Amino acid sequence: MRKRTLLISCLMIVVLAASGCKKTDINNSPDLSQEESKKEKKDEITPEVEMSQDDTKAEVVPYDYVQDLNIIDDNYRNFYEIFVYSFYDSNGDGIGDINGVISKLDYINDGNDATDSDLGFNGIWLMPVMPSTTYHKYDVTDYYNIDPQYGTLEDFKKLVSECHKRGIHLIIDFVFNHTSSKHPWFIEAVSYLESLKEGEEPDLETCPYVGYYHFTKDYNGSKTYYKAGTSDWYYEGVFWDQMPDLALENENVRKEIENMAKFWIDLGVDGFRLDAAKEYYSGEKERNIEVLKWFTDYVKSVKEDAYIVAEVWEEEAAIAAYYESGIPSLFNFPLSQHNGLITSAARKLGASSGKSFAKTLLSLYEKYSRGNPAYIDAPFISNHDTTRISAQCVNDEDQMKMSAGMLLTMNGSPYVYYGEEIGMNSMGAKDENKRLPMQWSVTDTQGITTPPDNADTVEQKFPPVDEQMKDPLSLYNYYKRAVRIRNENPEIARGDMSVIEELCTKDISAVKKVYKGSEIVILYNINTEPANISLKDAGLTDLNIRGYLSVDGNAVTMSEGVVSMPKYSIVILK
C-alpha cells in the first residue's frame, strides 16, 4: 500500500511539473481569472531572468544583415541625453562629473567604424553644467563656467575635443528663461530696490539689472510673483521663487544671452537645447516664437551649421506654429510618454493600431514641415522630466524593445535618455526618481554615483550594463542593433515618408522612405503573434531584407515576396 501511494504521488508530481512548464497552457487556461493569469506571468519572470548566458545564446538566430555604416556628417544625429550628476563619478565624491562622461565616451561611441563595442550614438545632449545652487542645475548663477561639482572649463574643453574625435556632436542645455536668485544680476537688482526710499522709482542707469527681470509693485496677487527682499517690489518666477524670470524683451538681456551663446560656441559646442521655451512669455505664443527666431538667427550668424532644439511642451498644432520661428528642431511631445503615439501603439492602448501609427506620424510630419520645411524632427519617448520607458510599459520588456525600435526608425534626430538602453526604472512623479544613478554594474561599483537627495529607493528590475552586454537578447543589445541599422541607412532619418496603406492593418504598420533617390520600406509587426506580409499586395517587388529588429532573437525572413515577421518585429527592406 505504501509503495502504491508513493507511486501515485510521484506520478502527480511529474504531471504538475510538466504542466508548470507549459506557459502557453497556463496563460490560455479558461479556469484562470485575469488576476490569476497576471500573477502566473509575474511568477514566471524569475526563471527567464535567471537563464544562463549559454542557454540564452543557444536561442539566438545568427544575424546576417550587418551593412557598412553610412553616416552623413550633418545635423541628423542619434542623441544620448546625459544627466552628468548621475552618470559616472571619476573622483569618488559620489557625484557624476565631466571627466566621468569622458571616461564613458567609448561606451556611447568609440569613433572606430571597425569595432562593434559601442552603442553608436553620434550626438550627446548634456543637461545643465553651469554653476548652480541645485542638484539639477536649472538655476544658473554663472553662464561662463562649469559647476565645480562637475569639474572645470578645462575638463569641458577636453570633453568637446574627445567628442569631436569620435564624430560626436555635443549640445548643452542653455537656460535663459530665468536665472538663479543667487545670480549676481538678481542680487544686485534686489539690493538696489531695497535701498530706494519710499516713493522713489528705480533708475536703470544707476542699476540696469532692475530691467533684467520683471519687477513690479502691482502683481495683483499672482502666485508667480514673489517679494523682492525687504523692498515693496515683487518679481516674476513662473517655476519657483528661486528662479526669477528674465525680461527677454530687454535689449541688454538679449545682448548678454548672445555673448553667452558665442562663448560656448567658441569653446566648440555644436549647439544648444533650449529649456522651457513656451514659458519665455507664459501663454503668449507669438512672443515666444519671436524669441526663438531672434536666438536662432543670432546663433546661425555665428555658426551657420549650429543645431538648436527647444522644449515646447505642447500639442502638435502649437509645435507646428513654433516651427515658424525657423528653429531647426522642437521636441515631438505628442510621440512621448505613456500616452504618446509610440508607447500607445506598442501597447495597443485605446484605438491605437499599426495603420493609425503610420498615418498619425505622417500627419505630424506634414504639419511641422509647413512651419519650417527644413525642420529636423526630435522624437523621444522619455527624458529627465518624465517617467522612464520601463514605467510606461510596466516593465514589459517586449513592449519596451518595440517602443525603442519604433523611435529609432523615425525621421529626424531621436533622443534616448541615459539608462533607457538597459531599462532603468523610475518611480512616481518625484523628479529625483527619474534621475537616478546609471546602473553600470552590481559587482563593480567604481564610478557609480550617489542618488540625488530626496530620491527614493527604486528597485531596478533589469540587469546593469556589464551583464546586459553579455546577453544577446538584452535591451542593451536591442538598442545597439537599432542604432546600427539607423547608421547604416540614412533614409531612415532623412527620407520623405509615405504610408503603404495596402499593407497597414490593426497589427501591421508599413511606410516607405525616399532619400536622394534611394528608397526603403519599413514594416512593423506590432503584435504578440507572428505575421506574414505579402509585398505583392502593394505592388512591391525586387526588395531584399536590409536589417531587422526582433524582441526574442527570432529572424525575419522573406520568400517569394512574403515577409515572415516574428512577434514585435521591425524590418527594413531595400
Image (spheres, helix red, strand yellow):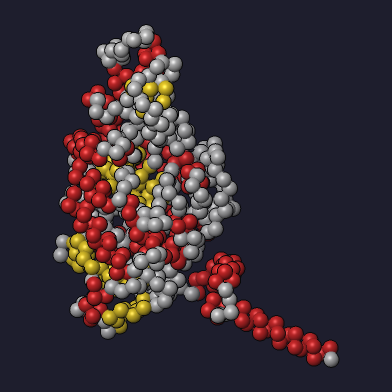
Q: Is residue 190 above or below residue 284?
A: above
Residue 169 or residue 38, whichever sits in front: 38
Quarter of the image with the N terminus is bottom right
Image point (45%, 71%), residue name: 552
Residue 84 vs residue 494: left or right? right
Residue 484 vs residue 47: left or right? left
Give the percent coordinates (x, y) of residue 423: 48, 57
Can residue 12 be seen here? The reply is: yes
Image point (22%, 46%), residue name: 321
Q: Is residue 522 above or below residue 394?
A: below
- Going by the picture, which residue comes out furthest to the right? 1
Residue 209 or residue 54, whichever sits in front: 209
Quarter of the image with the C terminus is bottom left
Image point (36%, 44%), residue name: 125
Quadrant position of residue 274: top left
Q: Is residue 17 above or below residue 176?
A: below
Give the percent coordinates (x, y) of residue 383: 40, 49
Give the percent coordinates (x, y) of residue 492: 26, 61
- Going by the picture, which residue comes out furthest to the left? 517
